[in-house]
Image (cartoon, grey):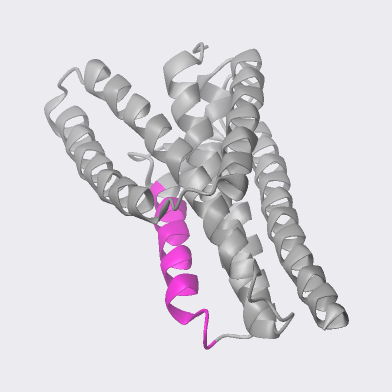
Amino acid sequence: MERSVSLSESEQSKFISKTYLWMGLALLISAVSAFFTAGKIFDGNSLSAFGKFLYGNRMMGFWIFAIAEIALVWGLSAAIRKISLQTAILGFLAYSVLNGITLSSIFIVYQIESIAVAFVGTSAMFFAMAFYGATTKKNLATMGKYLMMALIGVIIVSVLEFIMYSFFRLNTSILDFLIAIATVIIFTGLTAYDSQKIIKISQHSNGSEDYQKVSIMAALELYLDFINLFLALLRIFGKRK
């Protein structure tokens, strides 16, 4: 019995460790991808050919990569039970690269000091809420449900803001600020919720390929929590160039 409990605790620890390691690897890949892409956008004081592809012609290239990201996440989520572990890993890493490419714009818009401060602040908030989610005895499932509903609302308002600004040239700075604040609140809560969910899933982990794929999807959720929290904080406090 003691050996069985020990093995169970070992598998639980491995599941949690792998999940956070996958998340950390994704953040590192995205950071390298963003930094490398940012260095290729300009040729002297003008846009390079790659920069024109990304941000010229109404940002056509940027939107291609952004849509590819969304499609990849949806595809992974829908097919995770059917695809192999290797395919899940490749999809996860590919998403990290694609997201890094679209994130490269922050190096153009914001001062590097602001990016660094936002990253440190995000890290502190993320790990504080992750610790809370992993240790609290309170069930956060209900909170997670309402946060997801709020996130859908923010996405809808963000689309409306984009239309208002892009097609009608309306000043949406106040609305953008409110969206950023709402985003910080939502993803701060989702970080705690997702962390608790990972702990609960890990209690049943047996080291199988299915659970390894679940670990990758859990890492993707944490990664998205971190990135969205980071971007929202940057929008609120970041100093533009």
Q: Residue 118: percent from the left, percent from the top?
A: 58, 22
User: Closer to the camera, 5 or 142?
Assistant: 5
Q: Is residue 148 left or right of residue 50?
A: left
Q: Is residue 7 left or right of residue 189?
A: right
Q: Residue 38: percent from the left, percent from the top?
A: 62, 33
Q: Is residue 204 above or below residue 21?
A: below
Q: Residue 30: percent from the left, percent from the top?
A: 65, 46
* Magenta stretch bounds: 63-82
Which residue is drawn at the image coordinates 37% and 47% (left, top)?
Answer: 60
User: Closer to the camera, 86 or 151?
Assistant: 151
Which residue is drawn at the image coordinates 50% and 23% (left, top)?
Answer: 234
* Residue 140 in view: yes
* Residue 91 in view: no
Q: Main secondary structure of the magenta part?
A: helix
Q: Is residue 71 above or below residue 40?
A: below
Residue 112 is covered by the magenta coloring: no
Which residue is drawn at the image coordinates 71% and 84% (left, top)?
Answer: 208
Q: Is residue 87 above or below residue 91?
A: below
Q: Residue furthest front?
A: 1
Q: How many marks?
A: 0
Q: Is residue 188 above or below residue 33?
A: above
Residue 67 is covered by the magenta coloring: yes
User: Closer to the camera, 217 or 26?
Assistant: 217
Q: Residue furthest right?
A: 3
In the figure, residue 163 lies in which quadrant? top left
Q: Residue 225: percent from the left, percent from the top?
A: 51, 45
In the figure, residue 236 lies in which quadrant? top left
